[in-house]
Every structure is written in C-alpha cells, then in structure tokens.
Amino acid sequence: MASQPEAAAAFARMHNGADVLVLANAWDAGSARVIEAAGGKAIATSSAAVAWSHGYADGHDLPISRLVATVEEIARAVRAPVSADAEGGYAEDPAEVGENVAALVRAGAVGINLEDGRASTDLHCAKIAAAREAGARAGVDLFINARVDVYLKKLVAAEAALDETIKRGKAVKAAGASGFFVPGVVSRDEIAAIAGAVDLPLNVLAFPGLPPLAELRALGVRRLSAGALPGRVALAATRAAAETFLRQGDSAALIAAAGPSVDYNALFKG
C-alpha cells in the first residue's frame, strides 16, 4: 500500500501522461470500489452525488463532517488515489477552508476540487493558498484542482467567457493551484486556447457537445470528469426499477434489471 505522499505524487503524474485521466466520479465507498474494479486509476468524488446519497442538496448543504467521513470510507475501500470535491471549501473564510481541507487530507484525500462559484477571484485564490498550506502541514503535496465556473454558471457574457476564464486560470496558477477545471466549455477552439494560455493540466466535464476523448487529448486536455452523471445514472436506474416493481410486483423483471450476478462481498473483501 502506497503512503499518502506517494499516492499524491502518483495522482499528480496521472495528469502529465500520454493519456487523458478519465474519472468516473464516486459518491460512497461502494461506488468507489466498483469504479476502481472497472479500471479507475484514481477515485474522485462528486459533491452533488455525495450530497444526494446523504439526502442533502448540492451546494454546501452537506455538513463537512459527512464529506470527511465519506472520504475516509472511500480511502479505506480502495487502493487508488482519492480526490475529494470540496465545492467552495464549505466556508467563506480562507482559514476555515484550510481547516476543512486539512480534515479531508487526514481522511485520506491526496487531491481536492476547489471552486469559485460566484465568489471573487481574490477569495478563490485565498482559499487555494490556504488549502496549499493545509496540505504542506500534513506533509502531502495536495493536488488542488481549481474549478472556475465562468462557463458553467454563465458568469459573464458569452463573448467574454474565454478571456475571463484565462484571466482566472492565470490567477489560480499564481495562488498555488495544481490543475485547472473549466466545466461547461465545449468549443474546440476555446478548449485549445485555454490549454495553451494557462500553464496547468486542463480538466473538462462530460457535457453535451463535448468533443470525443481522442480530440480532447489533441486539444490539450489532461483530465475528463464525469461529475454527477454516474450518480444520476444510479439514481435513475433505482427509480425505474422501483417504479416497475412497486407497480407490477414482477420479481423476474427486477432480477433482469439487476443484471448478471456479481459477488460484491468478494469485491469488498478483496
């Protein structure tokens, strides 16, 4: 079993290889172990899917203690490096963000996502600096994936989105970010421009209109995240199976929906 600093170094290297790091985001220890068994090289959480799994809405509604416990459970269940979606740090005060990040690192995280949302770039950068210090105090070179929501939340007019994103990317790089996450961008020209202008591994989100994986690599993308989609797939499948069974009581249909039998006890003991 790799030490946490070794896992952090391995996770960082995954962003600089010949292939794009593809992440099918998890929401609990079970989903994380299944994703790892399916070939996941690293495990990243989805803040939305984690929140939903606990009966909370996404957007800082989940108590930080629940996220920390979830990360600890995931780190116990898998051997792959673990990165936690920390939303906006679950606080506005950078010092408090640093404390929350320190708790995630103690739980086993070697990477985090830290987003700006609708906050100022200055505040985002202060939170990144606090997260960097928290990792250093723990002896972990934390991979801080700085998420900028210019495209996702339409923070500026469409014609200004590219320039604003690049401006923010350069700012988070100076603040100590390790990666640059731009959810919502799908234009080939804009993806290439961001990758060329911001000297950080570029992460994009699975999104309608996004180019295929091979093209993303050629455009300069180094990480592709599924985000909440795997969690949504699981919830949709559960609802569909439950509705059919509750309406019809058809055992055979439910068994068929479950798919081929899998020895999950063996998987989780492995």
Image (cartoon, grey):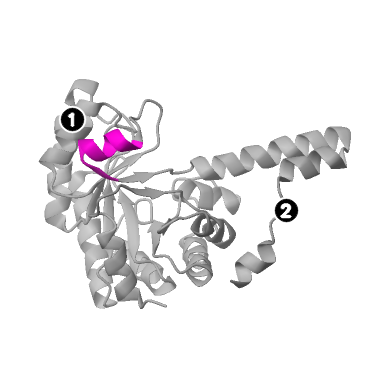
Q: Amino acid at mark 1?
A: Leu
Report the front residue among 61 and 165.
165
Name the dominant secondary structure of the magenta segment.
Answer: helix
Is residue 269 depicted above or below 249 in this figure? below
User: What residue is drawn where x is 67% and y is 62%?
Assistant: 264
Which residue is identified by label 2? 261
Q: Quadrant of residue 251?
A: top right
In the figure, is residue 137 to the left or right of 89?
left
Inspect the magenta stretch and tell me whether residue 215 lies in it: yes
Q: Can you say which quadrant of the picture contains the C terminus?
A: bottom right
Report the front residue among 26 and 49.
26
User: What residue is drawn where x is 35% and y is 56%?
Assistant: 89
Give the SS element for disc 2. Answer: loop
In the figure, is residue 66 to the left or right of 20?
right
Q: Quadrant of residue 81?
A: bottom left
Which residue is identified by label 1? 162
Q: Quadrant of residue 137?
A: bottom left
Is residue 124 depicted above or below 143 in this figure? above
Give the x, y percent position of residue 168.
Answer: 17, 42
Inspect the magenta stretch and tell me whether residue 108 lies in it: no
Q: Residue furthest right?
A: 249
Give the x, y percent position of residue 118.
Answer: 30, 39
Q: Which residues are magenta?
A: 213-222
The residues bearing labels 2 and 1 have C-alpha atoms spaced at a distance of: 48 Å
